[in-house]
Amino acid sequence: MQLKRLFISVMLMMGFAVSSYSQTDEKEGKVTLFQDPRIDTLIKQHIEYNAHKTTQPGYRVQIYFGNRRVQADDAKANFLKKYPDEDVYLIYQQPNYKVRVGDFKTRLEAYRFYRQIVADFGSTFIVKDEIKKK
């Protein structure tokens, strides 16, 4: 997270401090771009950072929210009985437990799955979350 903030900060500073400009050669229609070589270095660092990241922004369906661990475990077990191939995540954020399922890149994918399970798990809803990269 610190590397991401550093990258954004440096990019903003360079945007203000470094002037990029272009010249056009009207005869041949070429564009020549002059930029600070440090920009390429920052882009490479950003690509390397993202290559090592194991999660990405996405969506999950939350099937339980409450402050009782036993009920959260029951919700997880019941879900796995009906959908053994789906990933289930038990999250504790004091003082509550959350059971979230799936790793969906788009809200539409999450909604399709939500429609499948809403009859079995009444109080479900779609939430933004960090999902595993596929």
Image: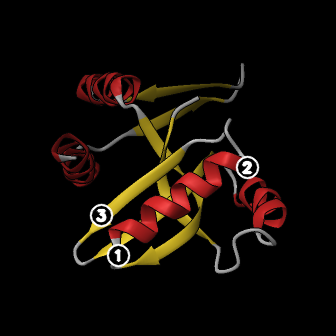
Residue 26 quadrant: top right
> Left or right: where does residue 64 sit relative to residue 90?
right
Instruction: Give the residue at x 59% y 29%.
Output: 134
Callout 3 amino acid? Tyr
Question: In front: 109, or 114?
Answer: 114
Instruction: Give the residue at x 57% y 42%.
Output: 87
Q: Is 61 rendered above or below residue 18?
A: below
Residue 15 coordinates in the image, percent (x, y): 29, 50
Mark 1, residue position: 68
Of labels 2 and 1, earlier in sequence is: 1
Cα distance, mark 1 to mark 3?
10 Å
Q: Is residue 67 visible?
A: yes
Q: Is 42 rendered above or below residue 115?
A: above
Helix, strand or loop at label 3? It is strand
Q: Is residue 104 visible?
A: no
Instruction: Give the residue at x 70% y 60%.
Output: 107
Residue 110 quadrant: bottom right
Of labels 3 and 2, earlier in sequence is: 2
Callout 1 amino acid? Arg
Mark 2, residue position: 82
Helix, strand or loop at label 1? It is loop
Judged by depth in the image, the label closer to the viewer, 3 or 2, is 2
Instruction: Tell me whether circle 3 and circle 2 mark residues in contact (CB < 8 Å).
Output: no
Cα distance, mark 3 to mark 2?
23 Å
Callout 2 amino acid? Lys
Residue 127 coordinates in the image, percent (x, y): 56, 68
Instruction: Give the residue at x 40% y 23%.
Output: 51
Residue 84 quadrant: top right
Answer few, some or many: residues within 10 Å of disc 1's Cα (few below 14, many 20 plus, some between 14 and 19).
Answer: few
Residue 14 coordinates in the image, percent (x, y): 22, 45
Mark 3, residue position: 92
Answer few, some or many: residues within 10 Å of disc 2's Cα (few below 14, many 20 plus, some between 14 and 19).
Answer: few
